[in-house]
């Protein structure tokens, strides 16, 4: 074979290999909770997951959906996974698998009006409380404590209801409270956060079970990313240090 033919064949092979690699690159379509996509704390979780998976050559796209719809679509395989979910989600959705370790731990606190000077988080039965719509894990804890609360359709509406006196408190994750307090301080003029944690919830990265063979690679990428110096403002204490 002449040198010219050899070089031509070599270049064509490289081009075809590159084309096939691009064609075979995996993209995961990941759902996240509707209304949370603009919250800085959740954007940081997205960034963590994106950087980790990209290190394995996996591209990620995110779709914002109501919680109930997102889990239904992932369970049916129309979407590939969910950004963060509590472990109890697999009880109702047999086609979902979770990371073997939590991606992070969400510390939930009580947000209440400072106008209620006698508020006591140990006597919640005396007050009208709120949780976000479809917050099943928090609601499970409330049932254990024999507490009844209403559901707020969105973060903003829930916080405004506490501000206006239509509710006495709302239970939210600490990183979410911190992020909204920074971006919408006007909502927090008369609000205080409980010093004691209400509940700690482990949250997992979730995939449809058709990706079960991919999960070990994803878990290793999370472990590597967690060991890096990540200058996050809201989720440094959320990310599991033992990934």
Image (cartoon, rainbow, N blue to C red):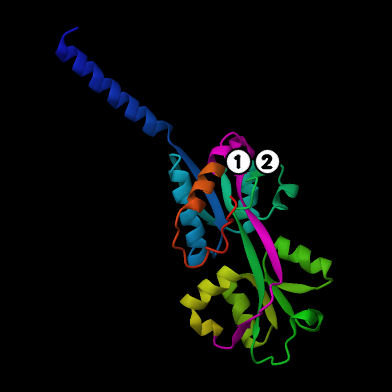
Q: Earlier in the sequence, mark 2 or mark 1?
A: 1
Count of numbered circles on the image:
2
Residue beneath the point at 63% across and 63% down: 106
Residue on which disc 2 sits? 95
Q: Position of residue 42 (x, y in %)?
A: 52, 62
Q: Nearer the viewer, residue 241 or 232?
A: 241
Residue 240 visible here: yes
- The relative height of residue 187 versus residue 6 in the rendered view (above or below) is below
Q: Residue furthest top?
A: 1
Query: In screen coordinates, is 47 left or right of 138?
Result: left
Q: Position of residue 208 (x, y in %)?
A: 62, 41
For label 1, the SS is loop
Say if 21 sits above or below 241 in the image.
above
Horizontal side of 42 relative to 199 (left or right) equals: left
Q: Position of residue 44 (x, y in %)?
A: 48, 60
Which residues fall within the magenta stretch? 189-218
Residue placed under numbered mark 1 in the picture: 77
Point out which mark residue 93 bears: none
**In front: label 2 or label 1:** 2
| Nearer the observer, 192 or 24 | 192
The reply to whether callout 2 and callout 1 are in contact (CB within 8 Å) is yes
Q: Residues within 10 Å of mark 2 (few under 14, many from 20)?
A: some
Q: Nearer the viewer, residue 74 or 107?
A: 107
Write down the quadrant of residue 176 in the picture.
Answer: bottom right
Residue positioned 80% across, 73% down in the render: 148
């Amino acid at each position: 074979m002449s040198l010219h033919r050899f070089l031509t064949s070599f270049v064509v092979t490289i081009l075809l290999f590159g084309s096939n690699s691009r064609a075979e690159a995996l993209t995961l379509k990941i759902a996240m909770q509707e209304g949370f996509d603009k919250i800085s704390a959740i954007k940081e979780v997205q960034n963590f997951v994106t950087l980790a998976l990209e290190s394995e050559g996996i591209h990620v796209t995110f779709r914002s959906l109501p919680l109930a719809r997102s889990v239904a679509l992932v369970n049916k395989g129309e979407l590939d996974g969910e950004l963060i979910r509590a472990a109890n989600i697999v009880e109702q959705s047999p086609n979902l698998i979770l990371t073997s370790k939590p991606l992070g731990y969400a510390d939930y606190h009580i947000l209440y009006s400072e106008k209620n000077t006698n508020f006591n988080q140990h006597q919640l039965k005396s007050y009208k409380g709120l949780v976000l719509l479809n917050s099943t894990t928090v609601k499970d804890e409330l049932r254990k404590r024999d507490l009844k609360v209403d559901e707020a359709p969105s973060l903003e509406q829930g916080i405004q209801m506490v501000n206006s006196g239509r509710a006495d408190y709302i239970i939210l994750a600490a990183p979410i409270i911190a992020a909204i307090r920074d971006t919408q301080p006007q909502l927090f003029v008369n609000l205080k956060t409980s010093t004691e944690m209400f509940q700690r919830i482990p949250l997992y990265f979730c995939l449809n079970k058709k990706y079960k063979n991919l999960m070990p690679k994803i878990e290793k990428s999370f472990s590597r990313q967690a060991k890096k110096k990540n200058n996050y403002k809201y989720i440094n204490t959320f990310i599991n240090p033992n990934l």
